[in-house]
C-alpha cells in the first residue's frame, strides 16, 4: 500500500511539473488570442523550430547553452512577427476561421520544411540533466526547470501587461479593438509587439522542452492540440484560467498514465475537455460578445 | 449544353475502365475518388461556416469499426460499414449537439472538434492490443480472392466503379442539400443565428442534421478506404493531420461549388504523386511544403478556391457580355 502511495505522490508531483510546462506553452498562445483574436494553429510548430535551433546551436555548433537559448528566443520572436506580417495581417478583416485555416497552412509548411531541411530522424541535445530524488520520489530536474521558468515567465508577462504603458495598451486593445485606435493607440504596432512576445514565449518553451524531449518535424502534433485545449478550457485569452487548466490537464494525464497508459491519460484529458465545454460553457462565453 | 456535357462526362467516367486498365493510373483514380467523396462530405457542412476539424475522427471511426467488426465479429462490411456510419453519426450527435445547444461557433467549434479528432486518434493508439496501434491494421483476407460478401475485390475495375458510384452519390447529396430548405436555413444561420431563430429556423436541429449527414458520409469514406487499401493506420485515416488535409483540399478546390472538393482532391493527390514519382524518397515533405504555401496563398488571395474563382470569373465575363 505504501508503495502505491509513493507512486501516486510521484505521479501527482510530476503532474504539477508537467502542468508548469503546459502552462508555459499556453501562455504565448493565450496572449496572441487575447490580443489579436487569432488562433495560431502552427504555434507548436514554432516551438518545434525553436527546438531545432537549440539542437543546432548547442549540439552541432557547441554554443554555450544560455547564449543558444537567448538566440532561439529572439529567433522565434522574429518568426512570430513574420507570421503576423505575412499571414495574419492580410487576413485581419476576414472571417476568424480563415485566419485559423491559414495558420493551418503554415503548420503544414513548417512541418515539411523541417522534414526537408532536417530529415525525420529524432534528434536530442545529448545533454542529460540529473534526476532529483526527493523522499523516495524521482523528479526530473529539467521538468523542475521548466516549471520554474513557466512561473517566472507568467509573472514577467503579468508585470509587463499591468505595469508598462505598452502592456496597458495591449490589454486595452484586447478589450475593445475598435475604440483603442481612436484613443491614439497604434494597433498595428501593438499587434507586432504581441506577436513578438508570443513568439518569444514559444521560443522559451522550446528551450525548456528540448531538455526533456527529442526533436523531430512532427513533435508539434504531440503537444500542439493539448495546448489549444488548455487555452480554450481556461477561456481563451484568460491567463489565470489557462494556468489553472494547464494543471488540471497535467494531473489528468499524469494520473491516467499512472493507472493505465499515457494515451489513456490524453484520452481522459480530451474527454474531460469536451465535457467541461458543456458543463461550464460560461467559461468560454466570457470573452464573446 | 452543360447538361449534355455533364452526361458525356459521366459516360466517359463510367466507360473508362473498359477501355483503359493500367493498374497504377487506376489506383490513383480510385484514391482520388475516395478522397473526393470524403472532401465533399466535409464541404457539405463546411460551406455553411461550420468548420469542423474533427472529420479525421469520423473517418477513422468508419474505417476501424468496419475492419474490427470483420476481424473480430466476422460481420460482413455490408453490416460493418453501416455500423461505422452509425457510430460516426452518434459521435457527431454526442459532440455537436451540446456545441450547437450552447452556441459554440466559429473557431471555438473548430477547436472542440479538434479535440474530438485527437481523442479518436489516441483511443486507436491506446487500444493497440485490438487495433494494432500506430502500426496500423489489416482486415483479414476472405479466402484470398474477390468476394461480394467480404467486399474485397482484386480487380481495380470493380473498385473504380464502386468509388465512382459513391463519389457520384456524394455529389447527389450535395445537390439535394443545395436545393433543399436545409440550405436556406443554414445560410441564414451562418449569417446571423439570432436572426435565423427569430424567423422560425430551429437552429440547433438544422445544424445537427447537416453535421450528422456529413459525419456519416465521412465514416463511409473511411470504410471504403479501409476495404480498398486493406490497410489502415491511425495517421492515414484519423487524427488532426487528416482533418486539416480535408479542410485544405476543399479550400484549394473551392468550398462553395459542388465539384470544388473533387478539384481539390485531384490537385493535392496529383501533386503528391508527381513529386513522389519524379523525385522518389527525396521528395518526402515537399508535397506538404507546397500544400502549405498554396493553402496560405489561397486563403489570402482566392478564398473561393480554384474552381470557385474560375466559375465566378466565367459568370462575370458572361454578365459583362450580356450587359453590352
Image: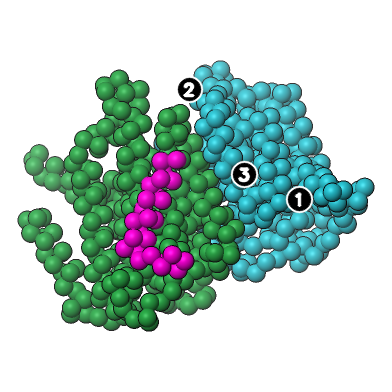
Q: How far apart are marks 1 and 3 (CA)?
A: 23 Å
Horizontal relation, residue B215 to residue A225: left or right: left
Disc number for residue A208? 1
Q: Which chain letter matches label 3? A: A
Give how far across and how far down residue B47 sits, in percent: 32, 43
> Of helix, strand and loop, which one carries label 3?
helix
> Nearer the observer, disc 2 or disc 3?
3
Q: Which of marks 2 and 3 is nearer the N terminus?
A: 3
Tell me the subunit letter for badge 1. Answer: A
| Mark with earlier residue (1, 2) | 1
Quarter occupied by the C terminus of chain B: top left
Instruction: Using the image as rendered, state which of residue B195 and residue B318 is in the foreground.
Output: B195
Work out whether residue A34 can be spotted: no
* Residue at the spot 93% in from the left edge and 47% down from the top edge: A135
Task: Name the colour assigned to chain B in the rendering.
Answer: green
What's the distance in space between the residues labelled 1 and 2, CA to CA?
A: 37 Å
- Magenta portion: prevailing SS class: helix
Residue B105: quadrant of the picture: top left
Q: In this view, does A191 lie above or below B235?
A: above
**Residue receiving disc 3:** A269
Mark 1 vs mark 2: tell me if same chain.
yes
Of residues B189 and A152, which is closer to you in this image? Answer: B189
Residue A52: image x %, image y %? 68, 59
Amino acid at each position: 500500500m505504501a508503495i502505491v502511495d509513493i507512486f501516486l505522490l510521484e505521479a501527482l508531483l510530476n503532474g504539477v511539473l508537467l502542468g508548469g510546462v503546459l502552462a508555459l506553452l499556453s501562455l504565448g498562445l493565450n496572449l496572441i488570442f487575447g490580443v489579436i483574436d487569432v488562433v495560431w494553429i502552427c504555434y507548436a510548430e514554432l516551438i518545434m523550430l525553436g527546438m531545432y535551433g537549440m539542437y543546432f546551436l548547442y549540439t552541432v555548433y557547441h554554443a554555450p547553452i544560455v547564449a543558444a537559448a537567448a538566440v532561439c528566443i529572439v529567433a522565434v520572436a522574429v518568426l512570430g512577427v513574420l507570421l503576423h506580417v505575412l499571414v495574419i495581417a492580410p487576413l485581419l478583416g476576414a472571417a476568424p476561421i480563415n485566419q485559423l485555416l491559414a495558420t493551418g497552412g503554415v503548420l503544414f509548411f513548417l512541418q515539411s520544411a523541417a522534414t526537408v531541411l532536417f530529415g525525420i530522424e529524432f534528434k536530442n541535445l545529448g545533454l542529460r540533466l540529473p534526476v532529483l530524488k526527493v523522499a523516495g520520489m524521482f523528479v526530473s530536474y529539467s521538468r523542475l526547470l521548466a516549471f520554474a521558468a513557466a512561473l517566472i515567465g507568467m509573472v514577467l508577462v503579468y508585470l509587463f501587461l499591468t505595469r508598462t504603458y505598452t502592456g496597458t495598451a495591449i490589454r486595452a486593445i484586447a478589450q475593445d479593438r475598435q475604440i483603442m485606435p481612436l484613443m491614439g493607440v497604434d494597433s498595428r504596432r501593438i499587434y507586432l509587439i504581441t506577436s513578438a512576445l508570443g513568439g518569444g514565449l514559444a521560443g522559451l518553451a522550446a528551450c525548456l522542452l528540448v531538455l526533456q524531449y527529442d526533436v523531430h518535424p512532427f513533435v508539434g502534433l504531440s503537444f500542439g492540440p493539448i495546448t489549444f485545449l488548455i487555452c480554450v478550457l481556461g477561456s481563451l485569452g484568460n491567463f489565470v484560467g489557462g494556468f489553472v487548466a494547464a494543471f488540471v490537464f497535467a494531473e489528468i494525464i499524469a494520473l491516467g498514465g499512472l493507472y493505465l497508459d499515457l494515451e489513456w491519460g490524453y484520452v481522459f484529458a480530451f474527454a474531460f475537455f469536451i465535457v467541461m465545454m458543456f458543463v461550464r460553457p460560461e467559461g468560454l462565453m466570457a470573452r464573446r460578445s | 449544353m452543360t447538361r449534355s456535357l455533364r452526361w458525356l462526362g459521366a459516360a466517359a467516367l463510367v466507360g473508362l475502365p473498359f477501355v483503359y486498365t493500367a493498374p497504377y493510373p487506376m489506383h490513383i483514380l480510385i484514391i482520388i475518388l475516395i478522397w473526393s467523396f470524403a472532401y465533399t462530405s466535409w464541404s457539405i457542412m463546411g460551406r455553411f461556416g461550420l468548420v469542423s476539424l474533427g472529420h479525421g475522427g469520423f473517418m477513422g471511426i468508419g474505417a476501424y469499426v468496419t475492419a474490427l467488426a470483420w476481424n473480430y465479429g466476422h460481420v460482413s462490411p455490408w453490416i460493418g460499414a453501416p455500423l461505422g456510419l452509425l457510430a460516426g453519426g452518434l459521435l457527431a450527435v454526442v459532440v455537436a449537439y451540446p456545441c450547437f445547444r450552447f452556441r459554440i461557433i466559429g473557431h471555438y467549434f473548430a477547436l472542440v472538434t479538434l479535440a474530438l479528432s485527437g481523442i479518436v486518434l489516441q483511443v486507436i493508439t491506446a487500444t493497440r492490443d485490438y487495433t494494432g496501434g500506430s502500426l496500423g491494421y489489416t482486415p483479414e483476407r476472405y479466402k484470398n480472392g474477390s468476394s461480394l460478401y467480404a467486399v474485397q475485390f482484386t480487380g481495380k475495375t470493380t473498385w473504380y466503379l464502386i468509388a465512382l458510384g459513391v463519389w457520384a452519390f456524394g455529389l447527389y447529396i450535395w445537390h439535394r442539400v443545395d436545393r433543399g430548405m436545409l440550405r436556406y436555413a443554414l445560410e441564414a444561420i451562418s449569417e446571423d443565428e439570432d436572426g435565423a431563430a427569430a424567423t422560425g429556423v430551429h437552429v440547433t436541429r438544422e445544424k445537427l442534421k447537416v453535421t450528422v449527414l456529413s459525419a456519416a458520409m465521412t465514416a463511409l469514406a473511411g470504410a471504403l478506404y479501409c476495404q480498398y487499401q486493406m490497410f489502415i493506420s491511425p495517421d492515414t485515416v484519423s487524427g488532426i493531420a487528416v482533418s486539416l488535409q480535408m479542410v485544405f483540399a476543399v479550400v484549394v478546390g473551392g468550398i462553395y461549388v459542388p465539384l470544388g472538393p473533387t478539384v481539390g482532391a485531384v490537385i493535392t493527390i496529383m501533386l503528391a504523386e508527381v513529386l513522389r514519382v519524379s523525385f522518389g524518397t527525396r521528395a518526402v515533405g515537399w508535397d506538404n511544403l507546397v500544400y502549405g504555401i498554396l493553402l496560405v496563398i489561397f486563403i489570402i488571395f482566392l478564398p473561393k478556391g480554384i474552381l470557385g474563382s474560375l466559375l465566378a470569373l466565367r459568370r462575370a465575363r458572361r454578365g459583362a457580355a450580356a450587359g453590352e
